[in-house]
Image (cartoon, grey):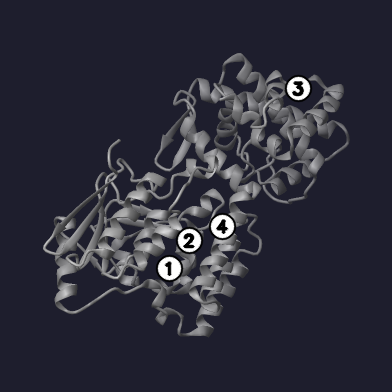
Amino acid sequence: MARLVRFRVLDGIAVVTMEAEPVNALSSRLRAGLWEVFDRIATNDDIKAAVLTASGRMFSAGADINEFESGTGGQPSLPQLCDRIENCPKPVVAAAHGQALGGGAEVMLSAHYRLAAPGTRIGLPEVALGLIPGAGGTQRLPRLIGAERALQLMVSTNAIEAEVGQRIGLIDGIVQGDLASGAVNFAQRLLAQGQGPRPTRSQRSRMADGRAYAKAVATARTALAENPLHAPQRVVDCVEAAALLPFEAGLAFEADAFERCLAHPQSVALRHVFRAERRIDNALIERDGAAFRPVEPMGKAAVQRLRNAMRAAAEWIVAQDISEEAVDGAMLAYGFRKGPFGKKEGERPNAEIVRRIVAALVAEGGVCVEQGAVQRPSDIDALAVHGIGFPRRQGGPMRAAQTEGLIGFRNAMRGYADDDPMWAVPEVLDEAIKDARGFDALG
């Protein structure tokens, strides 16, 4: 099995290179390799400083999402690794290129000094998966750039370029030319100047103005008051805790918030859609930059079937003397961008309306799977999110049914089918109920 970490020493500078191409996902094997190397660095008196860099097209895309699902993370955890790097008794210089995202950015934050190649993008986009940075990001980032900018970076999910990072204090320098050589030269200059480790946890200058810090937290909390997402609120709580609690207590607060987010139905749904987008056949959906679009003819044909099913259910509901405004209001409240009748405002929660429409989508989606129009139930979820505006935080109709509970949902569909055969229970739902993994067991 190939080693994922390369280690060499140049004139007293340890150069540590992550080699888990193409994106250097911080898997348990990569973390274990880094842990071993940093143990060697800490105990070898001939090593005076360390440079952490990466091969491939980027520094690191962050944690391996598959480990979240399987529970196979192993030791050391990413938070433990970040603490190990930060507590290294020799100065550690992180040198990033391409992208440093999520856990990759948190590894950079745990280093004592940070360099980057021109155009490197740094971001903490975890809230897009219903999570928060869970390896000290919510505690270290505001220490470097202040509460306001830290909150903007984490809540927006937008990455910033290294040049911006340098202006705001996140990056210590931009390296022109060979990144590793530039980082080694930087480390040598640190040693020549007598500069030792500079733990991020010890930096509090950006927290010195307590009123300004508290105002930034309060402003962010107010701005998110109507936001239906769970994770951004927890980011604000953690950034507030960074100023109020000792560092170790702040890490514990963050760890608890991360675990709560990980178990939250929104994160389960958002991670499900993320995986579904990457598994679906490109004959159904194509990726265009950050966007996904249904493809002609197969993808758009499946989307049209879902749209027709949603419309038929909505019209049946209206036929029972329920107004179009009530139907659309219920769908908007659930998270659709617009209702089946085209209304874009007037949210009015109504669980029964939502369940009937989702059930119609499950029925049609199940038939699509059985007929081979799509390969698996998660394909329906990806198509619904990108084709009919199904709310991403609900995970798509098949995931929404599973979140509610498949047996109870099937029982409701059996009752609905007495009203109209559009709600007939598909065989794929019966099959999913036979396995504890539900629809996930069907491909």
Q: Tell me whether circle 2 and circle 1 mark residues in contact (CB < 8 Å).
A: yes
Say which residue appears at 40% left-offset and 77% top-offset. Answer: 202
Percent coordinates x, y for residue 195 in the rendering: 22, 77
For the residues labelled 1 and 3, the Cα–Cα distance comes to: 50 Å
Sequence-wise first label, 3 or 2: 2
Percent coordinates x, y for residue 136 in the rendering: 46, 64
Q: Residues within 10 Å of mark 3 (few under 14, many from 20)?
A: many
Residue 150, which numbered label?
A: none
Percent coordinates x, y for residue 374 in the rendering: 55, 21
Say which residue appears at 70% left-offset and 31% top-offset. Answer: 310
The amino acid type of the residue labelled 2 equals Met
Say which residue appears at 74% left-offset and 36% top-offset. Answer: 405
User: Which quadrant would residue 360 be assigned to in this image?
Assistant: top right
The mark closer to the camera, 2 or 1, is: 1
The amino acid type of the residue labelled 4 equals Phe
Q: Tell me whether circle 2 and circle 4 mark residues in contact (CB < 8 Å).
A: no
Residue 425, which numbered label?
A: 3
Sequence-wise first label, 1 or 4: 1
Residue behind mark 2: 154
In this rendering, the answer to whether 377 lies above or below 223 is: above
The amino acid type of the residue labelled 3 equals Val
Residue behind mark 4: 258
Secondary structure under badge 2? Answer: helix
Residue behind mark 1: 141
Sequence-wise first label, 2 or 4: 2
The amino acid type of the residue labelled 1 equals Leu
For the residues labelled 1 and 4, the Cα–Cα distance comes to: 16 Å
Secondary structure under badge 3? Answer: loop
